[in-house]
């Protein structure tokens, strides 16, 4: 196994983009190749994370369509799908090809264009990430699922509505300074708890939005990375785990075993513990998701994540800065793009060029979570 | 790079199946594991080729859903997509994981359930394999595209309607003996040229049908394959190539460069030439596709494929037996399943247990072709 590094990375703005899916993908892919200073002809394989292009932009065979449009003909171009973790999966597949010596230069990307359809249609499409034979037919949406998680967590640990809203306040505060973020306005706890009800107790500002966007990265063996980039970032751990497919399969909705297992595997591979992680981009699709994942990943013991948040332990300067990019709640969540978008922020942090910089960050983690915990990818990066 | 072998394989019947997508997939996957005599707990990764489950069965995150349903929790489970070549891509990704030492046991599968939607909806979904920004919006369907190929080929080489119909006659004759085939009735040239007009000059019996089905295979290193199977089949060559995304990009529609390049690469990797191939499963989505691919793969020079067919050179006993399974035209074409379904037939041939057996077949080839030549996977197997 060879060590693998990211030598170039780019992310588009996230939000409602008045561009085609190809234009969005090209901006990220061409930007990543430019950042890497690798000419397209050196790229040997293209892996694209995308959730549901068939339904959302009526286009399948989307990886070859993009590959051809950015000047990468002939090389294998494949879409990989695993709900909201599709981007993380693309990174992992690309990582493997380079680690195992099959390829020297792989372009990985994540993309979703969601705003071309109506919000009801987008919501219906997102439900296709649930097991439709079991849970999808009950009408449970993802806000509904995470509302159940919120209620159970609050009931078990006595966490208040205001404490949970603090996730959104923190992430919007960081996102306000991120020029690529979808929402750049700070919010207060009152704003969150008085925003429109979505799925009781979750309000509008507890939920990430429907977004367009793409992110891409160029991978190569670490041993040649410095020929291309002054600031390569090494992928020292990565793991993909399949979790349970439906809410009823969990004994208790206050934790997700796919996150726990993926984090354990990635940290074992990287030979690090949570103490070594300087910055964390985490899958905060809903406010409660950040609290639960901060515990599942091992940074806080179960039931103490909300308290840690109130104490500022998840802010820059605290024990573990979480989502300095603004997270999904502020930055946006173009499904297939999110996994690579998180890695984009971690790379900026390790390069020392983030908007909300964690001082002297050396090791960062990205946590990309799909469906009802059905897929989880955890990556650990080091400068 | 380690040598990789197929130690277990299974294919469901192809056709209109009154089962859920999970049941169809499970039949193939569990069957392949049983054929391999490998218990589920030894499988380390699952890769599923599928085209458009979101549109056709309203289910994304389909690989984890299947993985969980067949007793493979926790391991990475990913859908890969590349139109009609999705199954071939799954095989290639699984191959790589084992070849490069990342995994010892990988389950690869292909699946499509297409008959749950109406024929117009299925046709509309298939068009999503074309580049919708360019060609999809012209209303060109796949029968329309291959009708253009037929007309151009006939005009350039003087091939007659009757000569082209012979592909269907041959493949239906073989398919009639294949218990897993969708269509098991022999047809005559008159039947073909008098069947319902679909896209001039293509008639109903020139076209493959809309099908449900799945196929799956278990891969492991060749060095331990005989511990599990008495009849392992080695993957000696495999290549995936991205081709052009639209008809207008071809100077001439009588050949597809993705097939040519994938065949060259796979044969170079396998260190064989066309002379060494004893049996060929080829992507005959339409009658003309078989003639064109038999040339592009290098078995006949351009323009002589139809003549070779009339002379019986593509029949069992001829120069290169093509589609003894009945091919897509007779066996059916559940999009994502086809690539692994072809490999299922080649494995049966190399084991000496095919319905239409090529005597003493030692090396076989599978040619899996997606969209307008946009993706092509060629695999070469050896007993």
Image (spheres, coloured by chain):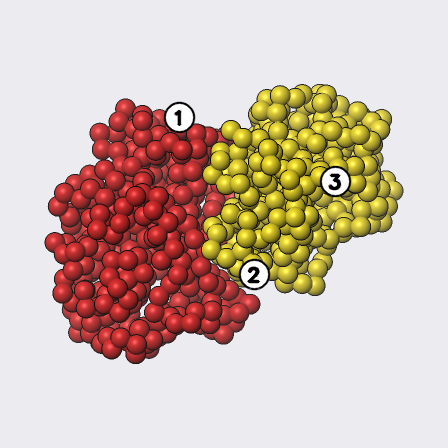
Chain colours: A yellow, B red
The label shown at residue B42 is: 1
Query: Residue at the location (82% across, 31% down)?
Result: A359
Determine whether A137 is above or below B223 in the image. below
Asked which secondary structure carries label 2, the reply is helix
Residue assigned mark 2? A69
Q: Is residue A16 left or right of residue A248?
A: right
Query: Residue at the location (42% across, 47% down)?
Result: B89
Alpha carbon distance from label 1 to label 3: 39 Å
Q: Are marks 2 and 1 on the same chain?
A: no
Residue at mark 2: chain: A
Residue at mark 1: chain: B
Circle 3 Cα neighbour tier, 10 Å, few/some/many (<14 / 14–19 / ≥20) = many
Q: Are marks 1 and 3 on the same chain?
A: no
Asked if the residue at tag 1 contacts the one at tag 2, i.e. Cβ–Cβ closer than 8 Å, the answer is: no
Q: Are marks 3 and 2 on the same chain?
A: yes
- Residue B333 on image: x %, y %: 33, 56
Front of the two marks 2 and 1: 2
Picture quarter with the C terminus of chain A: top right
Alpha carbon distance from label 2 to label 1: 41 Å
Residue assigned mark 3? A348
Q: Is residue A250 left or right of residue A147?
A: left
- Residue B368 on image: x %, y %: 35, 53
The answer to whether residue B358 is seen in the rendering is yes
Q: Is residue B53 left or right of residue A327?
A: left
Residue at mark 3: chain: A
Q: Quadrant of residue A175?
A: top right
């Amino acid at each position: 196994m060879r060590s693998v590094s990211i030598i170039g990375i780019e992310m588009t703005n996230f939000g409602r983009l008045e561009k085609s899916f190809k234009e969005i993908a090209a901006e990220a892919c061409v930007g990543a190749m430019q950042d890497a200073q690798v000419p397209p002809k050196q790229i040997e394989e293209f892996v694209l994370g995308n959730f549901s292009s068939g339904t959302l932009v009526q286009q399948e065979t989307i990886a070859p369509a993009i590959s051809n449009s950015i000047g990468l003909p002939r090389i294998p171009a494949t879409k990989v799908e695993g709900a909201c973790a599709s981007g993380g999966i693309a990174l992992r597949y690309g990582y493997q090809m380079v680690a195992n010596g099959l390829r020297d230069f792989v372009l990985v990307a994540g993309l979703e264009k969601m705003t071309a359809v109506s919000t009801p249609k987008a919501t219906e499409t997102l439900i296709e990430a649930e097991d439709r034979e079991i849970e999808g037919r009950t009408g449970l949406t993802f806000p509904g699922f995470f509302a159940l998680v919120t209620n159970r967590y609050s009931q078990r640990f006595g966490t208040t509505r205001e404490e949970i809203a603090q996730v959104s306040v923190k992430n919007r505060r960081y996102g306000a300074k991120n020029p690529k973020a979808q929402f750049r306005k700070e919010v207060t706890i009152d704003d969150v708890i008085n925003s429109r009800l979505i799925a009781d107790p979750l309000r509008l500002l507890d939920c990430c939005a429907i977004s367009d966007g793409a992110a891409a990265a160029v991978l190569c063996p670490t041993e040649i990375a410095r020929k291309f980039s002054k600031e390569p970032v090494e992928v020292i751990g990565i793991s993909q785990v399949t979790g349970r497919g439906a809410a009823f399969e969990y004994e208790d909705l206050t934790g997700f075993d796919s996150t726990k297992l993926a984090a354990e595997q990635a940290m074992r591979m990287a030979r690090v513990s949570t103490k070594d992680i300087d910055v964390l981009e985490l899958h905060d699709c809903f406010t409660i998701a950040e609290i639960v994942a901060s515990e599942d990943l091992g940074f806080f013991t179960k039931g103490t994540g909300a308290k840690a948040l109130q104490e500022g332990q998840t802010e820059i300067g605290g024990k573990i800065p979480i989502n300095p990019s603004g997270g999904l709640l502020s930055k946006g969540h173009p499904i297939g793009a999110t996994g690579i978008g998180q890695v984009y922020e971690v790379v900026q942090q390790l390069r020392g060029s983030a908007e909300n910089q964690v001082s002297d960050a050396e090791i960062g983690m990205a946590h990309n979570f799909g469906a009802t915990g059905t897929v989880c990818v955890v990556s650990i990066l080091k400068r």
